[in-house]
Image: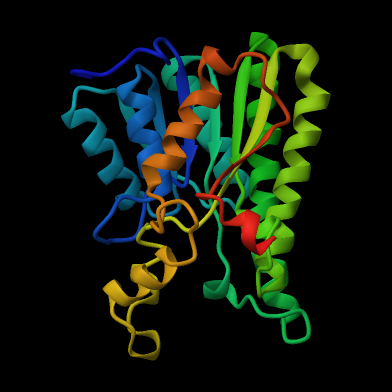
Amino acid sequence: MSGAGQRLAGKVAIVVGAGQLPGATIGNGRAAAVLYAREGAKVVAADRDLAAAEDTVKEITAAGGDAIAVRADVTSEDDLVAMVRACIGKWGRVDVLHNNVGVAKAAGDAPVTEIEAAAFARIMAINLEGMVLACKHALPVMCAQGSGVITNIASNAAITDYPTVGYRTSKAGVVSLTEHLAIRNAEYGVRANTILPGLMETPMAVEAKVGRGGATRDEIVAGRNARVPLRRRGGTAWDVANAALFLASEEASFITGAALVVDGGQHLVTG
């Protein structure tokens, strides 16, 4: 891609959750897919919304990158098998698996005394089980190659005073899952790390809340920014994508099992 670096030249990356909701800013998954491509990776943009994944691919290919879109619902193991097969069929390897899927209140999350069993089960299926199954089918490819990077997107909700039980519990599980992946697969040259984003100005985090209680977009953003110690500004999807790029690159070749907090210091005052 024109003007891009080559930190991932020759690599192939699967980004699960590479689409996004409509909004004024870019989402975490799309930003990661675009940045990986800018840095030389071929990208499989996977999302349950195929049209959203195709929009991500259009952005990548318009800039001269190489990408394909795949429909994948993380609650369907068959979809995840097909996703990995599509990647292998196109490029013959998997160098990076980037898992970026998560839900909370939209799936019925609530405090522990109010949570419905079905809602808790659905949140765990999407936020945690989906990552387990994506790793299950990408790992054999990476181990056979003798190399690979898994980056799982958790949340600083796992380490802060988060009000609902499903999201916090599932994201804490993502951290533990990643540690398990790191130690059990180190001998095969596979690295696994977690990113814990804080208050990011993404469509899922902001636009989805507009209108609740009459709040405007500007009011929602301002309220979130006020909770961030570092310059009182929220993060962007590029902050998460840049962290993911580092972890996927050779610069992080001796880093595995790490949990990288990207939240402007928010966890230091609310943990």
Front residue of 49/153: it is: 153
Q: How many marks?
A: 0
Residue shown at the point (46%, 20%) measured from the top left? 12
83 w.r.t. 247: above or below: below
Front residue of 6/140: it is: 6
Q: Can residue 251 be seen in this snapshot?
A: yes
Q: Is residue 121 left or right of residue 25?
A: right
246 w.r.t. 26: above or below: above
Residue 139's quadrant in the figure? top right
For the C terminus, give its image quadrant: bottom right
For the N terminus, give its image quadrant: top left
Residue shown at the point (33%, 28%) measured from the top left? 67
Q: Can residue 70 be seen in this snapshot?
A: no
Q: Is residue 129 left or right of residue 65?
A: right
Residue 186's quadrant in the figure? top right
Residue 195's quadrant in the figure? top right
Front residue of 208/141: it is: 208
Q: Position of residue 216 (x, y in %)?
A: 28, 80
59 w.r.t. 215: above or below: above
147 w.r.t. 122: above or below: above
Q: Position of residue 267 (x, y in %)?
A: 63, 55
* Colouring of the image: rainbow
Q: Is residue 233 left or right of residue 157?
A: left
Residue shown at the point (26%, 19%) measured from the top left? 4
